[in-house]
Amino acid sequence: MMGNPHTLTLTLTLALCLGADAVNPGFVVRLTQKGLDYARQQGMVVLQQQLAKIHLPDFSGSTHVSPLGKVKYSFHSMVIRSFQLPNSQVSLVPNVGLKLSITGGFIRVDGQWKFKTKLHFISGHGSFDLKVQGLSISVGLKLGSDGSGRPTIYPSACSNHIGDVNVHISGKYKWLADLFHRSIDKALRKAIENQICPLVSKSILQRLEPILQTLPVTASIDNVAAIDYSLTGPPPVTAECVDVQLKGEFFNHVNRTAPPFSPPALSLPVDHSLMVYFGVSEYLFNTAGYVYQTAGRLVFTVTDHMIPKNFSIHLNTSSFGALIPQISKMYPNMLMKLDITSTSTPFLTMKPGNVTISTMTDIEAYAILPNGTLAPLFLLNVTTTALAKLGVNASRIVGNLEISRVQMALKHSDVGPFSVSLLNAAVNFYITHIILPQVNALPPVWGQCPLWLTNRGMELANQRTGLFANKLKWSLTLDRLL
């Protein structure tokens, strides 16, 4: 996994921030305690670097030392040489957000000091070495979202405590400092404690919040579609996990309209053994189908050169003449072309163990004349239902994509009446052996994680996965979306 703390910070920021008008999300990112523990290890590197930049202001004071009387002192030019935060923990705070706890912190500071007494001949200056041990810090992180669907994170209830302060002073009069050692320890402790919480809050508000407020909440897919991944609301937090609920909706770049259906409820399994889970609703896929269908992009053309040479049936009038004799008589020995156009939005339904895809298309057949022009033959309306039966095999999801139902109706014929049922077998052949392999061979669109189907949703986690249809790999990758 990622080792760069800045990369991880951005990743978790995106995870805690991604879709915001839908009642139900189309996409959910679940971070468990294991995921937060990993993030903590990387994030502490950044926090330690920031805390090491603490500026300790000069301070002065006075104390009474017998028999010298009042002694005035000041400490200045303090520089932090070492800052270590060895023990830390991030815990989930239900209905609020997160809590960061740090214990066993260690700070080493170098600086200069000077003093003077009523006896002007007893004054001096020197250097000092300060060691702070047992530093503890506790800060709450309230998670939310703004009106644009971007995440917000605010520090709350910050406190810190120093267990022990050890000052070693050098110089001619270091024996004098030993006389008011406790006053020095108390003053230095207070100076450091007063700096820590403001710096932690400042780091969150000035470094992280601006990043969150400029995060994009949409991403372009191509020249037609984009995806909206703004937050639907503040991330729900329980004692086991935080669920980042994203809109997960495709929309048209030029003319964004609301899809004619709403996102269904999405549920994830009650399991927190992995670091991250992804829940994908059928709403995400159906909005993609809606956008591309209304934009007129769900159009496929099938020609004979796309059919393997060793297949016995080819896309020509001779092959189709066995089913529709009029074709071979009117257009002997000519190649054919099929235009397949979606007439309604493809609809995907997820259920435990399988995915069902329903489509309605028009298939228009042409004969390609010797001069290259097209002669229309017939127009069919085809309703198809494809079923993907899925299972888990080692680190992959495997499955079998089947055409479970094909219904045909003749809308128009330029070659006279013919039996549609005879053509059913041929169309099934082309769908199964030509169309589906092309769909399966499309470039990856979804992410590198194992995937389990749940009720109207899918849970993904850590490793690359693929669906297998007709022995061809159908990879799902998130790269194009994020």
Image (cartoon, helix red, strand yellow):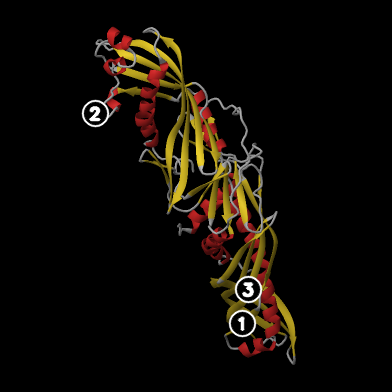
Q: Amino acid at mark 1?
A: Val
Q: Amino acid at mark 2?
A: Lys
Q: Earlier in the sequence, mark 1 or mark 3?
A: 3
Q: Secondary structure at mark 3?
A: strand
- Tell me the quarter of the picture where residue 332 sits: top left
Q: Residue at x 42, y 14 (%)?
A: 379
For residue 309, the mark is 2
Relative horizontal placement of residue 88, taking residue 66 as reference (left or right): left
Q: Secondary structure at mark 1?
A: strand
Between the residue at mark 3 and the residue at mark 2, the CA separation in whole angstroms equals 75 Å
Between the residue at mark 1 and the residue at mark 3, the CA separation in whole angstroms equals 15 Å
For residue 167, the mark is 1
User: Can you see residue 478?
Assistant: no
Q: Is residue 296 above or below residue 271?
A: above
Q: Amino acid at mark 3?
A: Leu
Q: Mark 1 or mark 2: which is in front?
A: 2
Given residues 123 and 469, the one toward you in this image is 469
Q: Earlier in the sequence, mark 1 or mark 2?
A: 1
User: Can you see residue 465?
Assistant: yes
Q: From the top left corner, tell me how far across and down residue 217 is, in percent.
A: 56, 40
